[in-house]
Structure formats: C-alpha cells, structure tokens
C-alpha cells in the first residue's frame, strides 16, 4: 500500500469514525436500531455542499449540516416515541423520506465541490500537502468529538439517556422522561452522522445522492470490529473502540481492494463488509466457546 | 400520605376476556404508616400498586399523594413523590451501568438532570457509606457493573436507592418473592430498618401472610379489586396466619354462596 492510499484510508476511516460514534450512541447506548443514518449522512453532505456552492461560509455550512442531521434523528425519535411506530420501521421511513429531501436540497443527484473553499482549504497551513493535512484535521475533530461524547454521557443528562437505553422502566421510576431522552439521544447520534457527511462532501469533491448507501453497515461494522479489538463496556474505551474500529475497517477494505491477487473489485465492497461484520460477530463467541469448552448458545442477536 | 379513592380499572373492556381488576378500590395511608397488602392471584394487588406508581391509568377514581392530585400524571413526574422497588431484581437497576451510576440515578430522582457530572465525588463517599451498612462488601465495588451482582444484592441496592431521595410513599411490589428464603429474610430486615430510619410511608405488597402480619403496622386484604379486610393495632397483633386464612376462606366462601344463589 502506498503512502498516498494509506493516508486516504486513514482519512475515510476518520470520517466514518464520526458515523461509528453516532451508531454507538443509537445502537449501544439507546438500543435503538437506527437506519436513519443512511439518509442523514447524505443529508449532511447535501446541506453542506449546497451552502458552500451558494457562497456561504464552509464553517456555517458544516454547522448547518450537523444541525440538519440532528433534526433528522429527532424526527425518527418522534415517530417512535410520540406516534408509537416501531423503532426500526420509524428509522426506515425516515431514511427513505430523506432520499427525496436530499434530492430536493441538492436540486439534482449531485453537487460537485471542486474549486470551492472548504473547512480544509480555509484552515490549511502553508507548505503542508492536502493528503497530510486532511487526515490531521480530521484526527483533531474526531478526538474532540470523542471527548465531547465521553463527557456528555457522564453528565446527569447523559446518564439519564444511558439508563433509558438500558432499562426504560427503571429510568421512568427514577423520574426520567424516557421519551425526551430518546429524542435527545437520537438527535445527538444523527448530528454526528450529519457532521460526518459534511466532512465527507468537503474531502471527496462534493455530495452525491448515493453517498449514503450502506452507511449504517459501515458504522455498525466499525462498532462491532472495535468491540472485537477492544472489548469494554466503559464509555471511554467503548467510544475509542468505535473510532479504532472505523479506521481498521477501512484498512481491511483498502487492503482487500488493493490486493490484485485476491481479485476483488470495488463492486465487491458490500460483500467484503458483510463478511467482515460476520467475522467480527462470530470470533468473540468462538473464543468464548473455546474458553468455556461448552456448546454454543442459541444464536444471539447483536 | 396517600389517598386512593374509588379506583376502577378494567382490562380489555367489552371483549370476552374483559377483566375487572379494580372495582371501587379505596385506601388511605396516613403519613409514616407501613401498610402490608395481601390477596390471592388476581385480587388486584399489582394493578393497584401500578396505578399508584402511574404505570397504569385508572378508568375512574382519584389518586392523591400528599394532597396533590396525581391521577393524570405519568410515572416519571410522579417519581418525585413515589419511590419503588420491583419484584424482579433485574427490573429495579440498570445492569449495564455501574453500582455508583445506578445510585446516582436514584440520587437525582425528582431533580432536574443537567450537565453536572453524574457521579460526584462527595456523593461517592456517601454511596460508599450507605453501601457499607448492607454488610455485603459492595462499598469496594462502586465501579462494578450492577449486572455482576446477585438478585439479592441487587434488591438490597434497590432498597438503598429508594431511600436516597425523600419520597411521600415507598411502594414495594413483592420485592422478596424472587429471592431464596435466607436472602428474602435479609432483604425484609433491611426493608424494616430503612423504613424505620427514614420514617417512610410505605405500602408493601406480598403474597406471604406471615410477612404481611410480621412487618409493618397495618394489613389490608384485597379481593376482586376491593379492600375486604383492614386491620391494625390491637386487633392485628392478635391475628395469626390461620385466622387470616379463615378470613380469606370466608371471603371466598361468600363468593361461592353468591354463585350458588345465582345457579339456584
């Protein structure tokens, strides 16, 4: 692998680390199987790209994209909490609704950002090449996001969200408005995904309607791979695991696609992802089986 | 204090499986009183307790806690006045969270949850102190996941949690039923200690007549969604389990007599 493709993999890995953090919040902390992500990722990209394209500041565009993601997550939560639609179904409804919304926002299937300013070009120091600068800035952003997530979920409000995901009946008995906590948690989760989409659009030369396809699988793969590498239920490690998982996952993909002898092509990406997630899910069970020398349990869902 | 007036709850109304769980249930518990509630399966014990906690909406009737009408308030706002320990030891705590995080959740019951650190240093000391009174060694395991604890240990912690914040009424829902006899005894003694120390107004639902007479100061028997026996003081201290069983049989006997009349 060349240095260029190495840094490229780090760059994409770091962008999807934000998705992984978001998915960690919805799937693990809130236990809300949220597919909104497939729509809120391109939503972030679309909002950011159209605003930059129309001359708004890239900073403002990035913030707006993050907020757009938050609104999308909030609506999914609202469908579930207030209209009592099953969680998975609520998120699927939101995902397909966002497909149309994204096309409307962009006014077409894509918006290229070739010579437009981005947060990356605006902040770029003299003499540092983009393929070094972009992963560096992303690393800083991801670290900030990680510590913000760690901090928030250790506050009273954050703990209330975690209690809601863990045992909502108990949470209510302790005076927690669990419905409001689901809305808040979903908004935070999808805000991170919207931010990720905005950064993706700014590093990959624009937004595209199909950029969101499979985002949820990538995010979930990152979380699961991370948990396999660094198994811990403590928040600081679990959020770190999600980030590491996102980068490692990207390397697997890059390695698989770059090795000519395997004969994999870009179109095999989703198959490789599915295999990888399966592997990451099975290996810990297998390890446990060997340790305890007992029969495998009935299939357990993730 | 608690004042439940004329509560009616019907499950699946106007269907073949219609169940009248509460039929004009009324109960008043003055401040500081410890009431035990017994009754056979389907008598309406759990339904009544759930109605007070806010988990079930009543069809008609009013529930007043400390002079405030809470009939239409959801569980989470009632929690400001109501503390509760569940029958299932797994239900009263969050297994993914640590012991101290669970206690912090209870410490913040009825307060606004903001952006302050959830587990504060000063509180941690207090948690440690309270846990040490259990004599289970949990004071050294504050950062262990509560899921690692046994059912009895979790139930003991749940009781402690229920007493961290002042409440107008403590609801105990057969909270020793899922435990082995020794652990149940331990948790029951702990209950008496915590209730006495904090002078809590308490309603304990139990299916053990022995427990119902030994603990607390007043016993109420439910049948078909109504109070059929209400004893306290001298009268109660003279009662023994066989007497209670006789009364129980009498209540049911009358029901049979009614049926006989109907059939006749």
Image: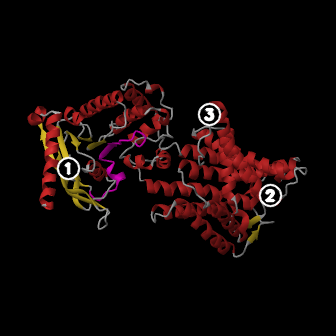
| Mark seen at residue B223 | 1
* Residue B203 image offset from top left, x and y in percent: 24, 42
Residue under pointer 3: A294
Instruction: Indicate which label's residue lies in the foreground, 3 or 1.
Output: 3
Are the residues at dot 2 and dot 3 in contact (C-beta closer than 8 Å)? no
Tell me the element at label 2. helix
User: Image check: A55 left or right of A129?
Assistant: left
Instruction: Indicate which label's residue lies in the foreground, 1 or 2.
Output: 1
Instruction: Indicate which label's residue lies in the foreground, 2 or 3.
Output: 3
Q: Name the chief secondary structure element in magenta.
A: loop
* Residue B241 image offset from top left, x and y in percent: 18, 34
Are the residues at dot 1 and dot 2 in contact (C-beta closer than 8 Å)? no
What residue is drawn where x is 83% and y is 50%? A256
Distance Cα–Cα, label 3 vs label 1: 49 Å
What residue is drawn where x is 73% and y is 59%? A200
Q: Is residue A128 visible?
A: no
- On whether residue B218 falls in the magenta region, the answer is no
What residue is drawn where x is 31% and y is 65%? B16
Q: In the image, is residue A85 above or below residue B236? A: below
Would you identify the image quadrant in which residue B18 lies? Answer: bottom left
Mark 3 belongs to which subunit? A
Residue under pointer 2: A268
Give the farthest residue toward the front.
Answer: B264
Tell me the element at label 1. strand
Mark 2 belongs to which subunit? A
Are the residues at dot 3 and dot 1 in contact (C-beta closer than 8 Å)? no
* Residue B243 image offset from top left, x and y in percent: 13, 36
Q: Mark 2 vs mark 3: same chain?
A: yes
- On whether residue B78 falls in the magenta region, the answer is yes
Task: Report the number of discs.
Answer: 3
User: Image check: A67 left or right of B108?
Assistant: right
Residues in magenta, as a range:
B71-91
């Amino acid at each position: 692998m060349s240095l260029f493709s190495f840094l490229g993999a780090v760059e994409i890995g770091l962008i999807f680390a934000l998705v992984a953090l978001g998915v960690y919040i919805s799937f693990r902390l809130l236990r809300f199987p949220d597919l909104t992500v497939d729509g809120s990722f391109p939503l972030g990209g679309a909002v950011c790209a159209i605003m930059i394209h129309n001359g708004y500041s890239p900073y403002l565009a990035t913030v707006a994209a993050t907020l757009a993601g938050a609104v999308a997550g909030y609506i999914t939560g609202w469908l579930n909490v207030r209209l009592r639609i099953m969680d998975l179904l609520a998120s699927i409804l939101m995902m397909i609704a966002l497909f149309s919304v994204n096309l409307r926002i962009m006014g077409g299937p894509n918006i290229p950002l070739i010579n437009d300013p981005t947060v990356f070009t605006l902040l770029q120091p003299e003499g540092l090449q983009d393929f070094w600068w972009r992963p560096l800035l992303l690393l800083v952003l991801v670290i900030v996001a990680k510590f913000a997530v760690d901090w928030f979920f250790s506050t009273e409000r954050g703990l209330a969200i975690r209690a809601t995901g863990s045992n909502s009946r108990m949470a209510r008995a302790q005076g927690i408005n669990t419905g409001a906590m689901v809305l808040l948690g979903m908004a935070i989760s999808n805000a991170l995904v919207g931010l990720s989409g905005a950064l993706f659009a700014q590093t990959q030369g624009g937004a595209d309607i199909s950029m969101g396809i499979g985002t949820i699988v990538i995010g979930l793969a990152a979380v699961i791979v991370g948990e396999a590498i660094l198994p811990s239920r403590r928040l600081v490690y679990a959020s770190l695991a999600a980030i590491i998982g996102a980068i490692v996952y990207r390397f697997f993909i890059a390695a698989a696609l770059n090795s000519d002898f395997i004969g994999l092509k870009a179109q095999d990406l989703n198959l490789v992802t599915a295999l990888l997630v399966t592997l990451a899910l099975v290996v810990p069970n297998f390890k446990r089986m060997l340790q305890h020398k007992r029969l495998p349990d009935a299939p357990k869902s993730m | 204090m608690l004042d439940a007036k004329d509560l009616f709850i019907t499950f699946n109304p106007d269907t073949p499986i219609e169940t009248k769980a509460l039929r004009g249930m009324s109960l008043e518990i003055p401040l500081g009183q410890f009431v035990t509630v017994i009754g056979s399966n389907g008598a309406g014990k759990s339904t009544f307790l759930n109605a007070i906690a806010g988990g079930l909406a009543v069809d008609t009737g009013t529930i007043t806690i400390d002079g405030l009408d809470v009939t239409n308030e959801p569980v989470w706002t009632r929690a400001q006045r109501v503390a509760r320990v569940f029958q299932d030891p797994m239900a009263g705590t969050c297994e993914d969270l640590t012991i101290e995080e669970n206690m912090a959740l209870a410490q913040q019951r009825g307060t606004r949850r903001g952006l302050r650190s959830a587990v504060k240093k000063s509180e941690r000391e207090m948690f440690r102190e309270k846990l040490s009174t259990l004599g289970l060694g949990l004071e050294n395991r504050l950062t262990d996941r509560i899921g690692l604890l046994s059912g009895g240990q979790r139930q003991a912690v749940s009781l402690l949690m229920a007493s961290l914040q002042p409440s107008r009424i403590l609801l105990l829902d057969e909270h020793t039923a899922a435990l082995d006899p020794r652990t149940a005894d331990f948790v029951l003694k702990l209950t008496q200690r915590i209730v006495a120390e904090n002078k809590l107004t308490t309603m304990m639902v139990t299916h053990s007549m022995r427990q119902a007479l030994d603990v607390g100061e007043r016993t109420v028997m439910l049948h078909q969604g109504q109070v059929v026996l209400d004893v306290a003081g001298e009268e109660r201290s003279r009662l023994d389990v066989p007497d209670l069983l006789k009364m129980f049989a009498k209540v049911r006997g009358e029901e049979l007599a009614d049926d006989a009349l109907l059939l006749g």
